Image (cartoon, grey):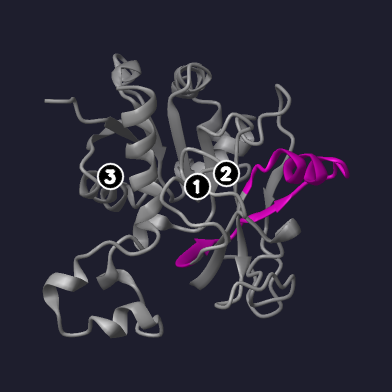
Amino acid sequence: MPRKPNIAVIYFPGNNCEEESLKAVLATGMEGKIVRWNDRRGIEKYDGFVIPGGWGYEDRIRAGVIMAKDPVFDIIRKEAENGKLVLGICNGAQALVECGMIPGLKNNVEMALAPNKNPFVSGYYTTWVYVKSAEEKNRCAFTGFTEKNEVIPIPIAHGEGRFTTKDNELIQKLIKNKQIIFQYSTKEGKIEESFPTNPNGAMHNIAAICSKKGNVMAIMPHPERASFIRQLPDIVDLKNKFAGNLTAMEEPAPAMHIFKSMKNYIDEEVL
């Protein structure tokens, strides 16, 4: 019997959603465990890593930067260089940017996840949004089950989620390399730079970026909070379709495709 992919959900002081992230991992048929940041011995045995959201180390200095300096990231970086998967969600995405693994074109920090630009709310902002997948199907390890130009309902919950850079050429490089995996869009899939479609003012409506190799992804919205039909808000037609059906409510929602894609990638490339 084939071995199941085994994922480590790395927990830092101040993280949250580690339980939801693990549940999404397990729901795809993978194995997984929540691993403390300082329990580093043997984590190289895992097939991939999820860095969940929250406020690691209270986001002191700036979001994700202290997490990014932790020795566990030296191990995760090395494993990623060997092809293993790394998914950073919200605070985890911030840490991946701060340690230079995303976008990963140079051996240093190339971007920032800056404070939101929002005409109505200063600081932390949470709401349901839509993200549109890249035009190329199966571009990276996290989109094997996502259709090209698929629109996915998903929540955001952050104060510093605006992908930005002072490098004028970097965005064009990301576009050329097809590293921009998800963009904020309307329900119909239209890319509008204005609020509320773009909820934080991110450059190019960026919601998620992968590494050039495609095995590392930083995503600001929370797929683990939108992986089951029951988690979707009532405004989403998919939930209304199954209202009252308890079994159907436990079925996977579109955001689960990210975790299913991880399993498929590991099954085909590693195991």
Left/right of residue 32 with respect to residue 73 in the rendered view: left
The quarter of the picture where the N terminus appears is top left
Residue at the disc numbered 2: 94
Place of residue 144 in the rendered image (x, y in percent of width and height, measured from the top left): 44, 45
Mark 1 belongs to which amino acid? Asn
Dot 2 alpha-carbon crowd within 10 angstroms: few under 14, some 14 to 19, many 20 or more: many
> Was residue 81 drawn as part of the magenta stretch in this picture?
no
Of the numbered discs 3 and 2, the one sitting upstream in the chain is 3
For the residues labelled 1 and 3, the Cα–Cα distance comes to: 18 Å
Identify which residue is drawn at 43% across, 51% down: 54
Q: Which of the labelled discs sits on residue 133, or is there none?
A: none
Dot 1 alpha-carbon crowd within 10 angstroms: few under 14, some 14 to 19, many 20 or more: many
Residue at the disc numbered 1: 91
Displayed quadrant of residue 131? bottom right
For the residues labelled 2 and 1, the Cα–Cα distance comes to: 5 Å
Displayed quadrant of residue 121? bottom right
Mark 2 belongs to which amino acid? Gln
Q: Nearer the viewer, mark 1 or mark 3?
A: 3
Identify which residue is drawn at 35% across, 22% down: 270
Of the numbered discs 1 and 3, the one sitting upstream in the chain is 3
Place of residue 81 in the rendered image (x, y in percent of width and height, measured from the top left): 53, 18
Look at the image and give the residue range highlighted in magenta: 152-180
Identify which residue is drawn at 29% across, 14% down: 42
The quarter of the picture where the C terminus appears is top left
Residue at the disc numbered 3: 25
Marks 3 & 2, CB-CB < 8 Å contact: no
> Was residue 168 drawn as part of the magenta stretch in this picture?
yes
- How many marks the image carries: the answer is 3
Quick one: 181 or 147, which is closer to the camera? 147
Mark 3 belongs to which amino acid? Val
Place of residue 23 in the rendered image (x, y in percent of width and height, measured from the top left): 23, 50
